[in-house]
Amino acid sequence: MKINLSDRKILVTGGAGFIGSNLCEELLKRGNNVVCLDNFATGKRENIKEFQNNPSFELIEGDIRNFADCQRSVKGVDYVLHQAALGSVPRSIKDPITSNDVNVSGFINMLVASRDEGVKRFVYAASSSTYGDSESLPKIEDKIGKPLSPYAITKYVNELYADVFSKTYGIETVGLRYFNVFGRKQDPNGAYAAVIPKFVSQFMKGESPTINGDGNYSRDFTYIDNVIQANLRSLVVENTKAVNTVYNVAYGERNTLNDLVQYLKAYLSEFDKNIANIEINYGPNRQGDIPHSLASIDKAIDLLSYDPEYSLEKGLKEAVKWYWENL
């Protein structure tokens, strides 16, 4: 991944989270100064433990809902990678107020603080949930449907605010609509754990995972290294047509949940042959779930020079190895 990005001061909000901590690691490797803002509501201290003694890394324990914390975190910062959010469709359905406070009010706080500090570019985590009830495939950035969950609404509102701030105040923004991101450091525990780490953990314990529905729902699963690449390219791109817009960040292929569990069983069986014989359970469809998801990544390829290197299979092999060594 040949991207020239060094000697910058970059804020990663949610930097102790799954995606955020991976971004912090890559930015530090490239010789940048990294500020991590996190309240550890969902982030993990172990995700950033290896950076704590790095003089180029600064941790600010704070909350994006607190404007003073946002102001403190952007001091002297060149760029912001805004990853802080309350994820999970089910969580937002259970508690829409908190999801809105974090994902919308917190987002505005970060935009205003970044604007006031003169931050050069604000790159933020958007979501494929924005496509809502649109049935068209592949998903193209300018064709969306109605949101199917409070979480989806909050992520779409982020895009609207970013667009208005870029037009009104001149701050450069880039939104990245993540599609089912997975990989190292993704938490397998908790009520809202993502499907891949959750299934891996269950297989490793000899348990039968439960698929919501008949397993034929499909997703464009996206390995973490593809997401890191998209973020870095969003920071360095110089084409004015490439900023103040949104992009799909995915691999551009879809696989069913049934496909997914078969891959997981095959790769995990290399470590424990008994996993190959574990049966799969099936339950009801989950409220707010989109049946099928497949991204067009043409826009990101054209404007960001995005070139995802990891297919689902290649990414799963890396992820499974990491979980086997770390869980």
Image (tube, grey):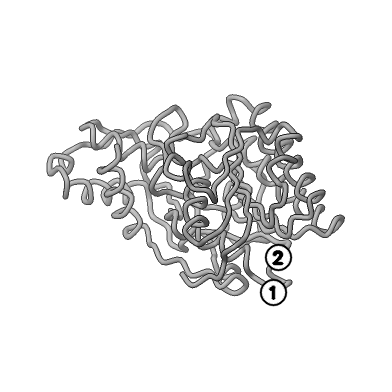
The vertical placement of 304 against 129, above or below, is below
The residue pinned by badge 2 equals: 243
SS at circle 2: loop
Residue plotted at (32% across, 58% down): 313
**Quadrant of the image containing the C terminus:** top left
The residue that appears at 61% across and 50% down in the rendered structure is 125
C-beta proximity under 8 Å, tags 1 and 2: yes
Image spot of residue 50 (x, y percent): 42, 43
- Taking the spot 67% from the left edge, 56% from the top edge, the residue there is 79
| Front in this rendered view, residue 116 or 139 | 116
Q: Residue furthest left?
A: 273
| Residue 130 seen anywhere in this rendered image of the structure | no
Residue identifier under label 1: 239
- Residue 236 in which image quadrant: bottom right
Q: Nearer the viewer, residue 284 or 129?
A: 129
Q: Position of residue 323 (x, y in %)?
A: 30, 43
